[in-house]
């Protein structure tokens, strides 16, 4: 008998909830990538240097990290739906603040708010989809595919508004705020009664003894070191390397996310044929190879090849790594919160490190540091694959 598809297994109310969660992730894809896309213009208008730019990217990642555990505990007090509705407002408040001041510490606070909201939505979206799908990689990669759709639109939006003249980045921010308001209107209609409310009880943290969970978390930690830095600094890297204009760099970033989008849908289609440990190993290996091409390239064609290859390698990592942990996220509701908190630390540290090195050397040297986490992720992926192939499992 043919296995029932994910969407066919959903009730009508779950259909609406899943579609709305996908919509929230699409918006998230727009505003997360927009931060990197508008960073050069924001730096120029407010007179910010590389270090402050790095701190802004890291502030977003810090918010994403610190909200991880809190987002898991808050539903125990006020429920999952109220938690999602409240925390989803914060990114758009943060973006509104950036329109009115160039004071570095205020901008850092604003980007911190965007990260807090991102962490909460990521936590709840992944937890709910993982629960409804029984931990299957295909729906999770599909969810992250919608993030990629938003990420494709972000540079195109930045490029479009830049044609209006100086300060066009503000129009892009305003568009994000409008989308946020739409999400605030659509989200209250979600019915989450059938989603188990997390409870704190004896054994709630037993997942920390699982080798499968720990390997998945640390692979994701080092992957996010690379992903957050590449997405945050890509436009600046192309422009300051002298191989592309600001407009061309925005188009290249859109191309990167088109490739990631295609890769995520491809990983979703292949998830039933290729087990997560093998797919993770292949993706980590590809990340190293194409990151080297991107870093060593000195002309547009070579860097473009590195960008496309890196996009494919990064594409399915998040959804596949979450699936690698098996049913842990369904069995232990707090596991996703801990996972998001621990792994997000990688996206906090590295963008600032890239910015600091770029300030004292150049942006190419700053980006070269990403080879270290890429190689560590590959080593852990190899360990994960070997452990999964043993008869005893992980």
Image (cartoon, helix red, strand yellow):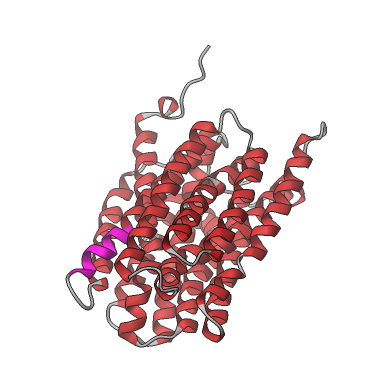
Instruction: Quadrant for residue 165, please give it.
Output: bottom left
Q: Which residues are magenta?
A: 154-163
Q: Is residue 42 left or right of residue 361?
A: left
Q: Tell which of 199 and 392 is nearer to you.
A: 392
x and y percentages locating residue 26 in the rendered image:
36, 51
Q: Is residue 219 something that shows in the picture?
A: yes
The quadrant the C terminus occupies is top right
Q: Tell which of 213 and 235 is nearer to you.
A: 235
Residue shown at 29% from the left, 73% from the top = 96
> Which residue of the protein is positioned furthest toward the left in this rendering?
164
Q: Is residue 291 above or below residue 52?
A: above
Q: Tell which of 284 and 121 is nearer to you.
A: 284
Q: Is residue 15 magenta?
A: no
Helix, strand or loop for the magenta stretch, by majority: helix
Q: Is residue 158 magenta?
A: yes
Total numbered badges shown on the rendered structure:
0
> Which residue of the protein is positioned furthest toward the top in this rendering?
1
Q: Is residue 328 something that shows in the picture?
A: no
Q: Is residue 333 left or right of residue 81?
A: right
x and y percentages locating residue 284 in the rendered image:
63, 50
Q: Is residue 260 left or right of residue 149?
A: right
Q: Is residue 104 above or below residue 57?
A: below
x and y percentages locating residue 306 in the rendered image:
50, 56
Residue shown at 39% from the left, 72% from the top = 239
Instruction: Quadrant for residue 190, please give it.
Output: top left
Q: Is residue 293 above or below residue 355?
A: above
x and y percentages locating residue 86 in the rendered image:
39, 60
Residue shown at 52% from the left, 66% from the top = 229
């Amino acid at each position: 008998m043919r296995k029932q598809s994910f969407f066919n297994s959903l009730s009508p109310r779950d259909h609406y909830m899943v579609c709305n969660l996908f919509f929230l992730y699409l918006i998230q894809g727009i505003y997360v990538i927009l931060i990197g896309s508008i960073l050069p213009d924001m730096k120029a208008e407010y007179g910010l240097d590389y270090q402050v730019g790095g701190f802004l990217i890291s502030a977003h990642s810090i918010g994403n990290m610190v909200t991880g555990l809190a987002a898991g505990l808050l539903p125990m007090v006020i429920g999952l739906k109220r938690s999602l509705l409240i925390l989803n407002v914060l990114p758009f408040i943060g973006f509104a603040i950036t329109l009115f001041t160039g004071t570095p510490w205020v901008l850092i606070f604003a980007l911190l708010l965007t990260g807090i909201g991102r962490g909460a939505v990521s936590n709840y979206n992944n937890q709910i989809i993982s629960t409804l799908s029984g931990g299957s990689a295909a729906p999770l990669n599909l969810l992250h595919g919608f993030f990629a759709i938003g990420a494709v639109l972000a540079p195109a939006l930045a490029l479009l508004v830049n044609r209006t003249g100086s300060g066009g980045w503000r129009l892009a921010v305003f568009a994000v705020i409008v989308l946020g308001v739409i999400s605030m209107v659509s989200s209250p209609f979600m019915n989450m009664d059938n989603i188990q409310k997390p409870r704190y009880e004896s054994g709630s943290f037993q997942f920390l003894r699982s080798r499968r969970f720990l390997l998945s978390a640390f692979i994701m930690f080092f992957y996010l070191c690379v992903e957050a830095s590449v997405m945050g600094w890509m436009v600046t890297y192309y422009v300051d390397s002298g191989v592309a204009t600001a407009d061309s760099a925005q188009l290249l970033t859109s191309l990167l996310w088109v490739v990631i989008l295609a890769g995520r849908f491809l990983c979703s289609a292949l998830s039933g044929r290729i087990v997560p440990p093998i797919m993770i190993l292949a993706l980590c290996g590809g990340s190293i190879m194409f990151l080297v091409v991107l870093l060593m390239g000195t002309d547009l064609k070579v860097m473009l090849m590195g960008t496309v290859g890196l996009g494919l390698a990064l594409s399915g990592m998040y959804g596949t790594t979450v699936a690698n942990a098996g049913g842990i996220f369904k069995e232990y509701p707090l596991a996703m919160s801990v996972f998001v908190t621990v792994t997000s630390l990688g996206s906090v540290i590295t963008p600032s490190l890239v910015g600091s090195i770029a300030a004292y050397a150049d942006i190419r040297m700053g980006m070269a540091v990403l080879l270290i986490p890429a190689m560590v992720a590959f080593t852990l992926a190899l360990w994960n694959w070997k452990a999964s192939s043993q008869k005893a499992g992980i």
